Image (cartoon, grey):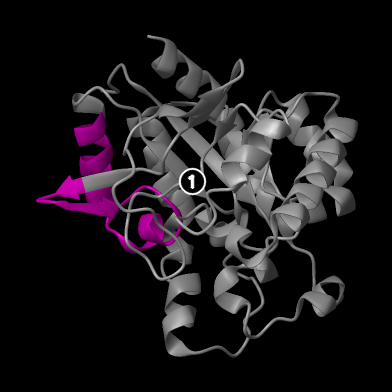
Amino acid sequence: MKNKIINALSFDVEEWFHNTNMEKYVKRSEWDGYESRIERNIEPILSLLETKKTLATFFILGWVAQRHPDMVKRIAEKGHEIATHGWSHMRAYQQSPDEFEAELKKSINTLKNITGQSVLGHRAACFSITPDSQWVIDVLLRNGIMYDSSIYPVMHDKYGMIGSPRFPYVLRQEKGQRLLEFPLATYKFLKINIPVAGGGYFRLYPYSFTRLCINKLNQDGYPAMVYLHPPEFDTNQPKIKIDPINKFRIYVGINNNLKKLKQLLEDFKFAPVKEVLFSNIER
């Protein structure tokens, strides 16, 4: 039986070759030369969500939105929330504040022009709001973003902000503006935050462990932030020659991922990020 807590379900909409684990092997200048598979990746997800009567948030990369506006419009017309994932999938701490802001504005405007809806949410590429890029917060506030979901309270080689809150909170409030944060889900074991319920962790862990972790969060009265990527459901995506560690990170568990998502939707209640976040902050 599903519990009463409503969790947040989100998808980072990007192409298979945008994966940061491929960045040493795939040149940005060659992106347009690779096969686009995002529309075929999105379809089984949309179909499953419709079958399970579940709405989600789609953090869409501006680069993808520009090339697939009909797909973005279709996602919005089905009732899902459209949020920004930036433009070029460049990590925030690899950009200057001006570069980041220019790309953010471009992404927001592109999504608004396609859907006619305001863009309230943001997720940085590779969760790249870290101690070295907290200036991003000011940029988001300046550009009308109302919530962020980029801060991962874990230790990792590419992201993470150890010591930051594990549950939804007010990230910054000033001059009548407020920016909320919805951290990615973690399971606390002893004093260590273990990342769960998203991306490679969702693919790698046995589903029973994922279910246990979300149940624990819900029993404690908190919603879980689940994040997934459409290419993670593509069993036929092109393979490129990469090192063993990144190969494992990219491809582990893809074959069973759609089955896991189906079970997840049967076991828990989900809604778009903005609905879950605002209801939890205001309660």
Element type where label 1 sits in the image: strand
Locate the C terminus and report the quarter of the image it occupies: top left
Question: Nearest the camera: 43 or 16?
Answer: 16
User: Can you name the residue that lies furthest to the front here?
Assistant: 175
Q: Please state which amino acid type lies under the numbered disc 1.
A: Tyr
189 in the magenta segment: yes
Q: From the viewer's perspective, tell me whether residue 214 is left or right of residue 259.
A: left
Q: From the viewer's perspective, tell me whether residue 212 is left or right of residue 248.
A: left
Question: Nearest the camera: 266 or 158?
Answer: 158
The boundaries of the magenta stretch are 188-217
Q: Quadrant of residue 126?
A: bottom right
Q: From the viewer's perspective, tell me whether residue 70 is left or right of residue 206.
A: right
Residue at x 32%, y 38% (from the top left corner): 165
User: Can you name the residue that lies furthest to the left here?
Assistant: 190
Q: Which residue is mark 1?
A: 227
Residue at x 45%, y 34% (from the top left corner): 182
Residue 202 drawn at (x, y percent): 38, 54
Residue 70 drawn at (x, y percent): 87, 41
Residue 69 drawn at (x, y percent): 87, 43
Residue at x 52%, y 49% (from the top left corner): 134
Question: Nearest the camera: 252 or 85?
Answer: 85
Q: Quadrant of residue 245?
A: bottom left
Mark 1 nearby-residue class (10 Å; few <14, some 14–19, many ≥20): many
